[in-house]
Image: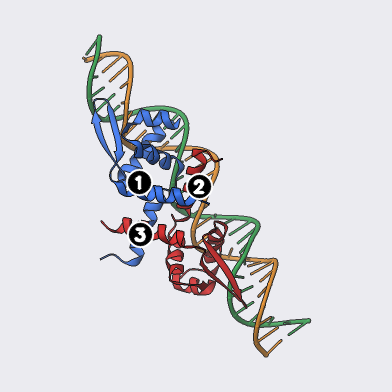
Chain colours: A red, B blue, C green, D orange
Amino acid sequence: MKTSLQRIQETMKLFKILSDQTRLRMIALLIEGEFCVQEISETLHMSQSSISHQLKLLRDTNVVKTRREGKNIFYSLKDEHIKTIYQMGYDHANEC
Amino acid sequence: MKTSLQRIQETMKLFKILSDQTRLRMIALLIEGEFCVQEISETLHMSQSSISHQLKLLRDTNVVKTRREGKNIFYSLKDEHIKTIYQMGYDHANEC
DNA sequence: ATTTTATATGATTACTCGCTCATATGTCAA
DNA sequence: TTGACATATGAGCGAGTAATCATATAAAAT
């Protein structure tokens, strides 16, 4: 049985994942489909290392899943939840 | 005309506001109604100063509005948007 | 087997952010 | 107008975090 405070902590963690520009850009990209690390890195114009670090965060919080294909590892959104919340936040933040 | 990156920045700012436990507890409280600073302070068991600092952030980002009544200043949610997003995040974070 | 390519990860650093303390501002009462 | 109460705010500190650099792991190619 979770306490009210624990539930708010879970909520906080979810929003924290979404409160970074790099991660949001990744999510926005992954909404479009499945991409490997170097594709993400090139698309966002960021180093392979920082992309990998952020992807690890998204993996650890169950936002994305991976699939290996040879040397490449392909990332995609784990489910539609994050997509829904992202789009809702996006719309609200930009409708004014 | 906003660029795609600017829109993501706006989205990031919105989620950033929601990515703190104290602010989430405040929002959860203000969903219930209108409260003055000391009421919020007592309810959350936090100092008047930290509450005021966080309320300033919520004011500056148009999440809450204020109303003075004598020595007290009453805070309430500015619109239903934040409430909707908060509840969606809350539900998603806690449904598993 | 060695090299090349793709990805992951530990350590370091610079920066951000939330709390606390002290103090300022504002309102009302005596 | 002085004091008490309510709120706001600036400075400083400590904790967390995102990018970088260097290096490790893993798969494929030669």
Q: Position of residue B42 (x, y in %)?
A: 41, 28
> B6 or A93, which is in the foreground?
A93
Check if mark 1's residue and mark 3's residue have beta carbons within 8 Å. Answer: no
Q: Chain of mark 2?
A: A
Whole-number angstrom distance, CA of label 1 to CA of label 3? 15 Å
Residue A2 falls left or right of residue B78:
right
Classify mark 1: residues with Cα within 10 Å, few (<14), some (14-19) or many (20+).
Answer: some
Residue B17 in sight here: no
Above or below, comparing residue B46 to residue C16 in the picture: above
Quadrant of residue A92 within the rendered picture: bottom left
- Of the residues under marks 3 and 2, which one precedes in the sequence? 2
Q: Which secondary structure lies at badge 1?
A: helix
Q: Does dot 2 land on a helix, a strand or a loop?
A: helix
| Numbered label attached to residue A30 | none
To which residue does mark 2 refer?
A10
- From the image, tell me which residue sits under label 1: B83
Q: Is disc 2 in the same subunit as disc 1? A: no
- Identified by mark 2, the residue type is Glu
Three-letter residue code for mark 1: Lys
Per the image, label 3 sits on a secondary structure element best described as helix
* Quadrant position of the C terminus of chain A in the picture: bottom left
Q: Which residue is mark 3?
A: A90
Please name the residue shown 46% across and 52% down the image. Answer: B92
Residue B33 position, x and y percent, is 32, 35
Provide the chain ID for the residue under circle 1.
B
Residue B74 visible, this angle: yes
**Separation (CA) of disc 2 from disc 1:** 17 Å
Q: Residue at x 27, y 25 (%)?
A: B71
Q: Residues within 10 Å of mark 2 (few under 14, many from 20)?
A: some
